[in-house]
Image (spheres, rainbow, N blue to C red):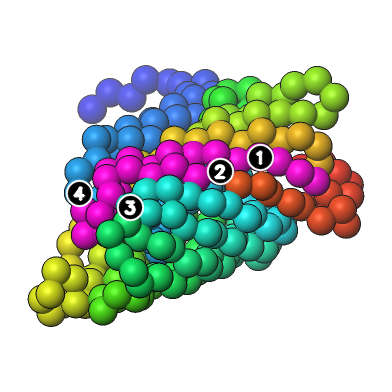
Amino acid sequence: MFMLPVRRSSVSSSATCLCTRALRLRVCATVVLLLMPAYGATAQAFTYPSLQLPTASIRDYTAAIASGGGTSVLFQWREGAGEGMHVGLDAGFADPKNSNNLRLFVGGSIGRELVRASGDQPLDLLVTGGVGVAFGGGSTLFRIPVGVSVGHTFALDDGMSITPYAHPRLSLDVCQGCAGVGGHSTVGLDFDLGANFQVNRQFAVRAAGSFTGSNRLGSANAFAVGLNWTPGAVTQSAAAVGR
């Protein structure tokens, strides 16, 4: 076997280039796999969009109203849990169409930043997971969604910005008492398209549509709009660390 002499600097440069390309390929593969068409999916703990941006929150609160199989009132709280990570709580109630029974729902979530936008690539990616339950009307729905939120923030004048994003996610859904039968489980895929309009450091307006929602909850699509608030002390802390 013949060995060709190779300079150390050349090997180091080649290895760095290969690593960079591999990282880009992994990011692209993740996005492609999770942006595939969705069929037979459900929303979060009930029929509403996740309103999840592609970056981790330090602390924020969102109050929203959603339509889809009826009307839902939603409250979300997200709290930082370390660098590039947060946990969250969803809670609210829904008034489904063609039903006199309110449904209550509650869910917990977690988000972890996978990639932040940089000069090499323009996307923010946040891996998400959660568990939720909705009950009422003689049935109970348990959900375990896992996905990724993908988007980019465009800076505007006077400190404003807009962040369009997509949030596809797989979910394991287990329903007790649906359609008059016992337990039934399915695996679905949700797909949210939304945008966050940051008015200033403390207030933002969020809107999103959720497609191929739960057929068991009486709707294929849902739309939500809400007001997001970040406490002043949190915005000052974020500014101090450059986020």
The residue that label 3 is drawn on is: 69
CB atoms of marks 4 and 1 within 8 Å? no
Q: Nearer the viewer, residue 114 or 139?
A: 139
Does residue 104 sit above or below 21 in this rendering? below
The residue that label 4 is drawn on is: 40
Tag 3's secondary structure? loop
Mark in the foreground, 1 or 3: 3
Q: Earlier in the sequence, mark 1 or mark 2?
A: 1
Q: Residue at x 12, y 75 (%)?
A: 180
CB atoms of marks 1 and 2 within 8 Å? yes
**What separation in Å lies between label 4 and label 1 (alpha carbons)?**
29 Å
Tag 3: amino acid: Gly
Does residue 105 sit above or below 210 in this rendering? below
Residue 96 position within the rendered picture, expressed as x and y whole percent measured from the top left: 35, 60
Q: Earlier in the sequence, mark 2 or mark 3?
A: 3
Q: Residue at x 28, y 49 (%)?
A: 219
The residue that label 2 is drawn on is: 225
Instruction: Mark 2: give few (<14), some (14-19) or many (20+) Cα within 10 Å.
Output: many
Q: Is residue 193 left or right of residue 8?
A: left
Instruction: Mark 4: give few (<14), some (14-19) or many (20+) Cα within 10 Å.
Output: some
**What separation in Å lies between label 1 and label 3 (alpha carbons)?**
23 Å
The magenta span reads 202-225
